[in-house]
């Protein structure tokens, strides 16, 4: 299990990135504990989607982008790759935006923090060792345990936490534009398109076999549970603002507002966890782009290769990191608006990404009778796809008809 362990935890916890910190804390700050139940609903969805990805990666030994090109042709391959690269780049901007916001609140200039972070993220990957990168990232994932300490510090009222986790409740004011926007953002940040590409390439990179499948499933289940629990802890921390009338636009602002009552540990903890989340998200998302682009181009695309053995692959990674970092340093960019909006955009393109995955998992020629989806898999997956499309249509309706929901 320890040899297989890694991709499932990393793909899940890296999705608790900077955008997730902002989104979950905003959910707690605006609606208290009322949206905790949504995380419970998303837990099995996270697991079932990523289990399919792990199964497909083991069966084919190839990344997700390569399989779409191979099975659906160049047009759909280009469509899928363009969607991925676009949403990944926009998401990377949010990661560096969070680094800028958090370290600025600690007195570090963005013109120092952002380039140093970009350099560190580059050095972490170009060592020519997948296992070294994986071990570093697992340590960063485990640092998110600190969110549980912060959740206990804010004393959310555990009976109310349990009730709102198990029983769906509607916030005061009912369905509003801001609530619909935030629900779609939560879905978009909990299940993101890049995760499909990342985990399949990661499984192929580790050269896992069918004998490893049950351990890979356990790895994915542990990652799903851990990630949803951390997301809940973020929401509990944001709920402190809801309880005490603290209005905030981003987690860095919230961290400064709570220092007089909760002290330096809480303030610095939130700021440093924002940076940790951004680093996790940046390395995973940039690798998802580099792996996908390398597969399509036919380049060497492996962390087992040295820099000079896979120059195109590493150049793509470095370009993604560098371009996003440079964008964030442009003056007067509305960083928090970008962060939340990207989560919604990810939610919009997610249904099409999952449809490709669903079709691949029903390809008997590719997987054989033993490893294709069972009927119950298909019922669950098509239900997920329908729900995601419904959320996308809701967002489109809200944009086109702003008065469709009563705004607060």
Image: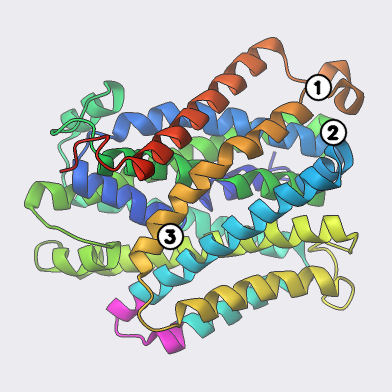
In the image as oriented, which residue stretches furthest toward the front? Answer: 401
**Mark found first going from the N terminus, 2 or 3:** 3
Q: How far, Cα to Cα, is label 2 from label 3?
A: 33 Å
Q: How far, Cα to Cα, is label 3 from label 1?
A: 35 Å
Residue in the foreground of this view, choosing between 301 and 352 = 352
Residue in the foreground of this view, choosing between 389 and 403 = 403
Q: Is residue 59 left or right of residue 194?
A: right
Q: Which residues are magenta?
A: 102-113
Please tell me the numbered disc located at residue 59.
2
Q: Residue at x 86, y 36 (%)?
A: 71
Tag 3 near tag 1, CB within 8 Å: no
In the image as oriented, which residue stretches furthest toward the top? Answer: 375
Q: Residue at x 63, y 37 (%)?
A: 352
Residue in the foreground of this view, choosing between 190 and 221 = 190
Locate residue 240, reporting x and y percent. Answer: 16, 50
Please tell me the numbered disc located at residue 294.
none
**Color scheme of the displayed model:** rainbow
Tag 2 near tag 3, CB within 8 Å: no
- Give SS at disc 2: helix
Locate residue 273, reporting x and y percent. Answer: 38, 63
Residue 298: image quadrant is bottom right
Locate residue 166, reporting x and y percent. Answer: 30, 22
Please tell me the numbered disc located at residue 18.
3
Residue 174 visible in image: yes
Circle 1 is placed at which residue position?
Answer: 371
251 vs 215: above or below:
below
119 vs 196: above or below:
below
Residue in the foreground of this view, choosing between 356 and 95 = 356
């Amino acid at each position: 299990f320890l040899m297989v362990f890694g991709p499932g935890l990393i793909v899940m916890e890296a999705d608790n990135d900077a955008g997730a910190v902002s989104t979950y804390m905003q959910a707690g700050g605006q609606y208290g504990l009322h949206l905790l139940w949504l995380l419970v609903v998303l837990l099995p969805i996270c697991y079932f989607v990523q289990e399919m990805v792990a199964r497909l990666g083991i069966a084919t030994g190839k990344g997700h982008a390569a399989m779409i090109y191979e099975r659906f042709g160049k047009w759909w391959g280009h469509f899928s790759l363009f969607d991925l690269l676009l949403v990944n780049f926009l998401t990377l901007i949010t990661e560096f935006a969070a680094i800028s916001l958090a370290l600025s609140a600690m007195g570090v200039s963005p013109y120092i923090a952002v380039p140093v972070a970009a350099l560190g993220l580059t050095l972490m990957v170009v060592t020519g060792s997948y296992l070294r990168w994986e071990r570093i990232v697992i340590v960063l994932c485990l640092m998110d345990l600190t969110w549980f300490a912060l959740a206990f510090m804010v004393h959310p009222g555990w009976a109310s936490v349990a009730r709102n986790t198990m029983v769906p409740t509607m916030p005061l004011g009912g369905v509003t534009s801001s609530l619909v926007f935030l629900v779609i953002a939560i879905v978009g940040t909990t299940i993101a398109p890049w995760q499909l590409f990342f985990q399949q390439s990661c499984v192929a990179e580790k050269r896992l076999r069918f004998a490893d499948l049950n351990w890979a499933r356990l790895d994915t289940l542990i990652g799903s549970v851990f990630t949803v629990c951390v997301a809940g802890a973020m929401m509990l921390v944001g709920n402190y603002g809801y309880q005490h009338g603290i209005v905030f636009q981003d987690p860095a602002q919230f961290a400064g507002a709570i220092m007089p009552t909760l002290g330096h540990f809480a303030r610095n903890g939130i700021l440093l966890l924002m940076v940790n989340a951004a680093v996790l998200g940046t390395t995973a998302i940039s690798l998802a782009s580099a792996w996908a682009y390398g597969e399509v181009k036919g380049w060497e695309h492996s962390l087992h290769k040295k820099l000079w053995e896979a120059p195109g692959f590493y150049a793509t990674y470095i370009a993604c990191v560098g371009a996003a970092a440079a964008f964030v340093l442009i003056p007067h960019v509305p960083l928090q608006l970008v962060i939340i909006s990207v989560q919604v955009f990810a939610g919009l393109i997610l249904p099409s990404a999952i449809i490709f995955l669903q079709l691949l998992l029903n390809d008997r020629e590719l997987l054989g009778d033993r490893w294709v989806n069972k009927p119950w898999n298909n019922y669950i997956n098509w239900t997920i796809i329908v729900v995601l499309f419904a959320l996308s249509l809701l967002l489109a309706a809200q944009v086109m008809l702003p008065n469709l929901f009563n705004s607060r």
